[in-house]
Amino acid sequence: MQESIQKLVEEGKMLPLMEEFYTIQGEGYYKGTAAYFVRIGGCDVGCHWCDVKESWDANLHPPTATNIIVDNAVKYSDVVVVTGGEPLTWDLTILTETLRSKGAKTHIETSGAYPMTGTWDWVCLSPKKVKLPHEGIYDKAHELKMIVYNKSDFKFAEEQAAKVNKDCILYLQPEWSVRDKMVPLIVDYVMNNPKWKVSLQTHKYLNIP
């Protein structure tokens, strides 16, 4: 990457854009809501069950001017979801400032593995065991989405729930490849621990992006 472009990426004036699309939010509190998704490349968290591993290598995704990303998004929706990869790999201050200046609501889906940048209307925190969130992010989370791949994930979920603010909404979501096995366990767990809610990847059931 050219040094001049690398500098723009480091400043957040350009971002390694993997894909962008208008769709229906499939998960969590805003499921069923129309939203524009901006998927930014780059992630070193390395979840073995990740369904977008092609996002991991930021070098595969062309640096795109942040103002162009914003202009594309606001043509479609006033709700913009920034995801990845791990979007907090990059400085998202300019992206969110520009989106908000154009009247858009800014949502992020993050593992919290890097310090928070940007100004967000909604923070979906989804911690991963292999690279825990920065402590400062827990208090900023509006929803905590814990992916359940096996039984040990319930213990991890409780450990993470103890760190978020009291108003944070708590979700347990089955990892897609083991959903048939884990859904009954999650249902039982939520019924016994009603502070939690069930989250499903409804966009996959609807066969939309």
Image (cartoon, rainbow, N blue to C red):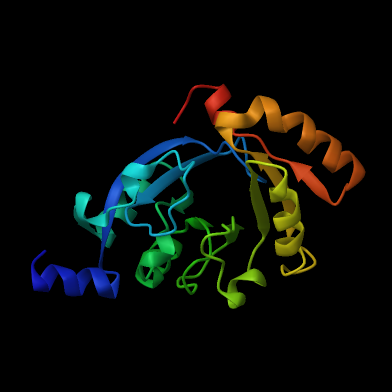
Drawn side of residue 121 relative to residue 75, left or right: right
Image coords of residue 110 (percent x, y)? 51, 58
Residue 190: x %, y % from top left: 84, 42
Q: Residue furthest right?
A: 192
> In the figure, 55 relative to 107: above or below?
above
Residue 74 in view of the camera? no
Q: Would you identify the image quadrant in which residue 19 lies?
A: top left
Picture coordinates of residue 126, whole percent (x, y):
59, 55
Q: Position of residue 34 (x, y in %)?
A: 53, 37
- Please state if 10 lies on the left or on the right of 82 as rendered: left
Q: In the displayed structure, does residue 60 sit left or right of residue 117?
A: left
- The residue drawn where x is 20% and y is 71% is 8
- Can you say which quadrant of the picture contains the N terminus? bottom left
Residue 54 horizontal side relative to residue 209, left or right = left
Instruction: Name above or below for residue 160 compared with residue 73.
Output: below
Nearest to the observer: residue 74 or residue 175: 175
Residue 101 or 91: which is nearer the viewer?
91
> Looking at the image, is 78 positioned above or below residue 127?
above
Residue at image x 67%, y 56%?
A: 144
